[in-house]
Image (cartoon, rainbow, N blue to C red):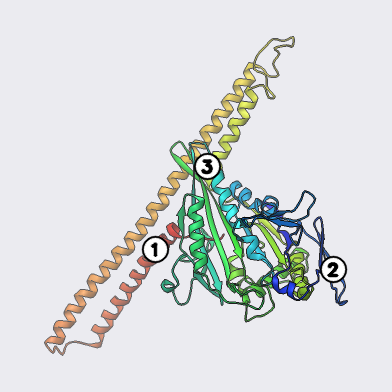
Amino acid sequence: MSDSAVRVAVRVRPFNQREKGLDAVCCIAMAGPTTTINDVDGGTGEGTFTFDYSFWSHDGFSVNDEGLLTPEDGNSPYADQKKIFDCLGVEVPNNAWTGYHCCLFAYGQTGAGKSYSMVGFGPNKGIIPTTCEDIFRRIGENHDPAKHFEVTIGMLEIYNEKIQDLLIHPNQRTKGGLEVRESKQLGIYVQDLTKRAVNSYEAIEDLVDEGMANRTIASTHMNATSSRANTVLIIELTQVTTYAGKEGRKPSVITLVDPAGSEKDEQINKSMSALRNVISALADKASGKLKKGQLIPYRDSKLTRLLQNALGGSSKTIMICAVSPASSNYEETLSTLQCADRAKKIKNHAEIDEDPTEKLFNLLKKENERLKALLGGQGVATGGGPNGGGGSDVSETERMRIVEDHKKEIAAIEKALEEEEAAKQAAERAKKAARDEGLRRFRQEMDRIRALIQTLESQVAGNDASLTVGDLSVAEGHTRRGGDCLKEAVNYLSNKHTTHAGGGVR
């Protein structure tokens, strides 16, 4: 486990057509990682903030015939899409490859450029498609026959506090939406979210296009084609290593969030208001200002609940804030910078989600490397005489002792693998026994109920006056016990299904 602060970057876009029509004045300046905002109308004055990155994308660019934006010359400060990924976005696949869960989310008012940074437009690919390309580039460069990769994606939107599956046609969705759940094994996840296995960047691209077409679109004052929903892409990357016929799995969940606008309008977006509150509470916690007994309000919205692991949890997290340069948006831009300034104080406790088998594999690899170094002359020479030249740092006896120690370590690892496999099999047998017992009791009670029903039916048909309240009570008791057994069996099967089919943000 390693403590890591949330990484924060700010990016300022060019004036849009509306701002140009209003003869807007730029109120943002950047120098290195520092962003300065100036109230050109003479109000609150100047504010200066320092982040991990301050990306200047306001001017100093050229556009080629295909619409690709690049710096106009070698001295231009313009940060194009490639620079955004190379400096910031690449950390997502880097962390995922190491085995960390990771999250990158955008923040800013509607029309500030969040979707451009996250998704892009035309040849100007954003962080999401470039990350997907990078993942499959790395997979294609793997030449280890003992390793293979599994990749699945899910895509959702949160609109009016309802989670909808974007990989399902709107006509097929449940009216109430999906729910965020939490379990010890799966962590925090979206129950029943569709997950599609993919084996190429093109497959992801097709699914993302499908999901984007299924989004809820509603025009806003700032953006005529803006989605007022939060769009979330979840990529699950699992590295599978095979050793001695056994598999070790190292999973990583990548969560990429293109949110709605951050305007302080509860009717527009409860999620972003809740996100600001969570960020503020976590910043207070990091600085020791959180009141005793005060809880972080993750449950105030579906988005913050889904991002609980990304904010203050075990994820590697990046926040990219998009701001307008126009003085007419001064208040919203200042609010965004203040939120970003608080977010950089948040501390996560990132850890690699590695199963025991994978950990043992890694230990074995390290031991192999250590032995090769010792026997290959990196710290231990393996032969020669007493007078230098071919001299030895250790005796033959010491060398043999190292070899024997190494053999013992390998044997211990193999034994641990066998014990782990035996424990898994024992757990499966116990689950099967519990399931079988539940089904047996259910069938037994159902047989008793059927027999009672037959008796009651024959008594009623014959107007048998001997039918008493006591008989009905007995039947009711058997029915209740049968129902309990049925619930027990159904709960077991439901839990087993969730274990094998569940997944999501941890």
Residue 441 badge: none
Task: Choose between 94 and 225: the one closer to the eye.
Answer: 225
Q: Give the x, y percent position of residue 167.
A: 47, 64
Q: Please tell me how crowded label 1 is: few (under 14), some (14-19), or many (20+) other residues with Cα within 10 Å.
A: some
Q: Distance between the residues labelled 3 and 2?
A: 47 Å
Task: Choose between 466 and 137: the one closer to the eye.
Answer: 137
Q: Mark 2 points at which residue?
A: 47
Q: Quadrant of residue 454?
A: bottom left
Q: Is residue 502 visible?
A: yes
Farthest left residue in view: 462
Q: Please tell me how crowded label 2 is: few (under 14), some (14-19), or many (20+) other residues with Cα within 10 Å.
A: some
Residue type at mark 3: give it. Gly
Please determine whether, in this image, residue 470 is positioned above or below residue 258: below
Q: In which quarter of the image is residue 175?
A: bottom left
Residue 140 badge: 3
Residue type at mark 2: give it. Gly
Q: How far apart are marks 1 and 3 (CA)?
A: 40 Å
Q: Give the x, y percent position of residue 198.
A: 47, 53
Q: Give the x, y percent position of residue 273.
A: 67, 75
Q: Please tell me how crowded label 3 is: few (under 14), some (14-19), or many (20+) other residues with Cα within 10 Å.
A: few
Instruction: For the residues labelled 3 and 2, say whether their Cβ atoms are less than 8 Å apart.
Output: no
Tag nearer the camera, 1 or 2: 2
Compare marks 3 and 2 and give the one earlier in the sequence: 2
Q: Name the residue under label 1.
A: 492
Residue at 56% in and 45% down = 137
Residue type at mark 1: give it. Tyr
